Amino acid sequence: MVQSSSGPTFTPLVVVELTSDAKREAVEWLLSRIRDQQQAGGAELLVEQLAPAVGAQEKENPNVFVVGASRQRLLSGAEEVGLFKEFSDGSMRTFTCSNKHNFRDFEGDGDSFLSMAECQFIIKHELDTLRAKDETHVPGYAQVKLYPGKSIVRRLQSKGILIQMFPLHEKEELKRLSFSWYKRVKLSFQPLDDIRHYYGEGLAFYFGFLEYFTFALAPMALIGVPYYLFDWEDYDKYVLFAVFNLIWCTVILEFWKRCSASLAYRWGTLSRKKAFEEPRPGFHGVLGFNPVTGREEPLYPNAKRHLRIYLVSLPFVLLCLYLSLYVMMVYFQMEGWALNVHDEEPTFWTGVLLFIPSVIYAVVIEVMNLIYRYAAEFLTEWENHRLESSYQNHLVLKVLVFNFFNCFASLFYIAFAMQDMVLLRQSLATLLITSQILNQFMEAFLPYWLQRRRNKKMIHKVQRRRTLEDREFPLAEQVRLEAEMSTYLGTFDDYLEQFLLFGYVSLFSCVYPLAAVLVLLNNVTEVYSDAFKMCRVFKRPFSDPAANIGVWQLAFEAMSVIAVVTNFALIGLSPQVKAYFPESDTQLILWTVAIEHGLLAFKFILTFLIPDVPKHIQIKLSRLEFQSLEALKKKKMLEASELRTVEQ
Amino acid sequence: MVQSSSGPTFTPLVVVELTSDAKREAVEWLLSRIRDQQQAGGAELLVEQLAPAVGAQEKENPNVFVVGASRQRLLSGAEEVGLFKEFSDGSMRTFTCSNKHNFRDFEGDGDSFLSMAECQFIIKHELDTLRAKDETHVPGYAQVKLYPGKSIVRRLQSKGILIQMFPLHEKEELKRLSFSWYKRVKLSFQPLDDIRHYYGEGLAFYFGFLEYFTFALAPMALIGVPYYLFDWEDYDKYVLFAVFNLIWCTVILEFWKRCSASLAYRWGTLSRKKAFEEPRPGFHGVLGFNPVTGREEPLYPNAKRHLRIYLVSLPFVLLCLYLSLYVMMVYFQMEGWALNVHDEEPTFWTGVLLFIPSVIYAVVIEVMNLIYRYAAEFLTEWENHRLESSYQNHLVLKVLVFNFFNCFASLFYIAFAMQDMVLLRQSLATLLITSQILNQFMEAFLPYWLQRRRNKKMIHKVQRRRTLEDREFPLAEQVRLEAEMSTYLGTFDDYLEQFLLFGYVSLFSCVYPLAAVLVLLNNVTEVYSDAFKMCRVFKRPFSDPAANIGVWQLAFEAMSVIAVVTNFALIGLSPQVKAYFPESDTQLILWTVAIEHGLLAFKFILTFLIPDVPKHIQIKLSRLEFQSLEALKKKKMLEASELRTVEQ
């Protein structure tokens, strides 16, 4: 093991941290497999042990390694992962080494061709696909079994030998990015291309969506303010606003799809093919043969998984929904009690008391959401899904259903069972404001405060060391500092928050027009706090080449269908509309239902009619496809004519 | 021009008929372009003029040509069109000449490797893609302009110089096919594979769907008969049947999708990529450059087309819908008048008179559908769509909307506005039976009768000639006979009929349970009459490599959504359900609507949950994809390492 005290001689990209008590054989074996030639089944990467902090008084983990790669290796890796880069004609094409000089930013040896995030993604891919050959177990750990083709890193991860693997921040670029992103308060778009450059497409899509949604809220907020100011008590007038809501929530999602396709095209992920998914790290089962790849792999019968889903997870979710309903009923009792107190002897304090149940309920909702979230993760893990994507889908489904129920059940009950629009407005306002305050606190301020405490300790330690030894270890310190930072767990919670906010706005904002304004304000601060937490609080995440916001698009669309139905029901309940049918409720309901069905049908037709990909991008994609088809045809024709010449 | 009196020396596959007064230069130019080498931009096919009937007294068109190709040319053509054939490991793969010996049925020179339908499809493709080089017009026709890249055959077709192009029947195989298909009355499945082998996938899918739908009707018919027999007048009891309907129409369509995927996999069209679509023959516009291909091509602004669609076609369709409503109202007046007459002095004849308005209405509906069909074709042609697929979509949409309205408006009116279930049942029965009789007559007997008259004339002529000259011209006579047969215009009308039948069954059969029985009987005879008309009445159609039933799947699914809503509304109307809500209609309606929304949501979720492709086929497809990816990766890795060796 080469161990230079002056740090590695290559640009370190990714940090791999093993447990401090990892067996020496295992470490050496892993390093040699990482360094081995590709023909020999290795990853052909560069890896060095991090220099220990000289004079460190506390025990530091010695098993921290930095991984890098030669320029040549990174380029061939880029080809392996199927990276799309800008071609000289402005189109986005899969990068190939043989064709490298035809790509726009490829100059000289191609040193600055790949962004650091891309390099880190390539290294992660190479490490993840480093497979066992004929080893039956990890050296030094007889109980950590291996079989040919098993991803080594994933096995070490699932057995806790590999603690973490994360990409390093780039100090200079991060400073530049954070300056243009959140350090100045300004009226401009976010630097989405820079975000994508630094964090990858997945995160850039989240911020893109956040920005889009915030702008989409503007017209609603603009209409909402006068509504709120001049019609405060005249809530019969909400029909027009409900109609606006109805159209709004359909249209913005359709246009986001087009917007998302434009972004994905610009970032080269639109026509990217999905790679074959490996089993996720936690997946276990009896060793057998995968019917698709023919490789040895653990298999877990689908029937067993279905049993777990339908006999355990489903009843559990239903139980939680029941619990949530029960809590709701307790809330209504408290509400009634507070109202009684206020009615008997109204003072300022009883007026405040009126809001207390809602606030408590809002806090309880957030706490229940949090607890349920952990339970859902545990259950979905236990369901033992083979693929990360199927795990994610089941988790999202579980969490969404409960969150939707938990947050909106009381509002639906007030609106349609109690038909009390004043209470609805009041509940909505309390729920919205309380959950926003809680969220901002939990999401940004708490982690930041924890991080600052940790940073201070570290800096203190470093400074003491410096005065002691007067030598600098910038890399070693940077790595240890970043290793201590919290890990960003992905965009799930961020999207979930936006989903619930979208629900509040699209479902009930006609009754409380200020909701759009509140959500708009929340989202403006959200951009800043999310940007801040990405740059300062969390470890850099690996980029993931997303082509859209994935399952969330579906979730938002489902919400917009529910919003159409809800708004129509609210319209049907409004005294304004009721006035048209003075005699018969039946007529009113039948007409409402008929028109609602028509609108739903129209909504679905609209979804078909508006193309998901803008025309100009469609043309560019077709052109690329056409060119490659033509090239293939020409090649085949040549081969065929050669063949015929030979046969003749 | 070689003209052997003994007929061509190759297997004739496709017949090309030009007008009898076609200019000699044009004919010779076309033939030489067809015969030219591929490198020289020709089609490299074999083509011969059909020997004129010796001693023909009437004038016969001399410009009839038969086209064939060498075995080698057909194989390379199979590669060009991307034909899928069975590989030695049982999977379906794109055929390549270099790999030909690894395909299952490839023996020796591969003489019987391609079916005749496949060969004919290849020849059609080659003729269609025979493009103008630097000709500015067709020789001999200065006004028939050409530009580089324009399909010659399409231009000749649109200018009427080329009258028709059709594949020849195979007498022996046709005899065998028709024997196993419709000549014996038997309880077995249709020989779908043979049908596909002879007619191609598109038609085989229609017959597959017809068979599937017929079988799917069986349980409904089985339940319907006792319902009909024992509850004839007790129409309150239809709730259970409506619930059954609801589930039935959702489930059968979902399973058809899986069934269709299995067929498409077996026939190798499931993962077939769509070729680039050429502009359709009738498309015209100002010459410009296609943004996708970069080729010169007529362009027609989208805005102009939209103007035509929204300012002419849409108002026209709405006018027709209004007319249809007007006719419906006239029908109800007639109905009322007949009822009056019957009530005043009921005799047997007035009892018959009760049915007369419905019969007349049914006939008028069919006539209106027919006229509208021509109008819709004219309008869609006039909208000047660039692609055949977009033309088809617009035509299908226009025709479906009107047909749906025309056939079902009166039933909806009776069911929900008049709420007269007795009249509904009577109307449904009359409409269904009348339209079935008319359809069978128009579809099979009329063309058959016309064809027989034509055939008799022909045979008469041939026999007279034989006695005169005592020489045989089997090919020439076969060609002339087939050229006279009617052209099969595609599966449009057949699917449309099934669509309307599906509507009758799924929308209202709970009120008239015998509907399923009637439709079942109709479909059983339909199988025989359709098979008969394909084998005996029509020219052989070119096969088209379809992967599913296309836009019709969508149409049937839309119908099934409407069916869910309708059945629920019928349930809400039923006295049985009304009995549960004795006091308030409002409660009843609200509950009905709420449950209906839930069911609709469940239906959509079900569509997501049931995978469209059966698991075992999914695995086979993934395996193929995985293998090709692995091969590609290996190739790239080799190239990259070679490159590195060179650079070092």
Image: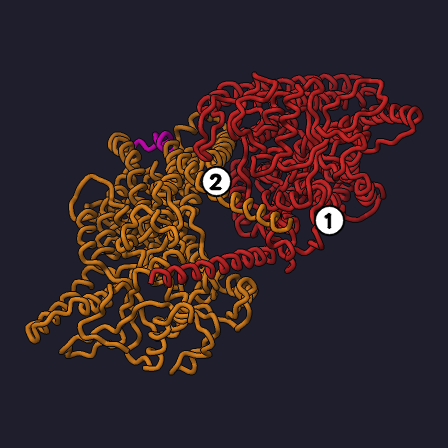
Chain colours: A orange, B red
Residue that sits furthest to the left in the current view: A467
Q: Residues within 10 Å of mark 2 (few under 14, many from 20)?
A: some
Who's the residue at 47% across and 28% down the image? B296
Q: Viewer-proximal residue, A560 or B229? A: A560
Residue A568 screen position, x and y as percent: 43, 35
Q: Viewer-proximal residue, A181 or B28? A: B28
Region rendered in magenta: A234-242
Horizontally, residue A181 falls left or right of residue B509, namely left
**Residue A626 numbered mark, or none:** 2
- Mark 1 falls within which chain? B
Q: Residues within 10 Å of mark 1 (few under 14, many from 20)?
A: few
Give the dominant element type of the magenta stretch: helix, strand or loop: helix
- CA distance separating discs 1 and 2: 33 Å
Kind of residue sitting beneath label 2: Phe
Quadrant in which residue A82 is drawn = bottom left
**Residue B112 numbered mark, or none:** 1
All told, the count of numbered labels is: 2
Who's the residue at 45% across and 35% down the image? B292
Who's the residue at 29% across and 48% down the image? A105
Tell me, yes or no, whether dots 1 and 2 are on the same chain: no
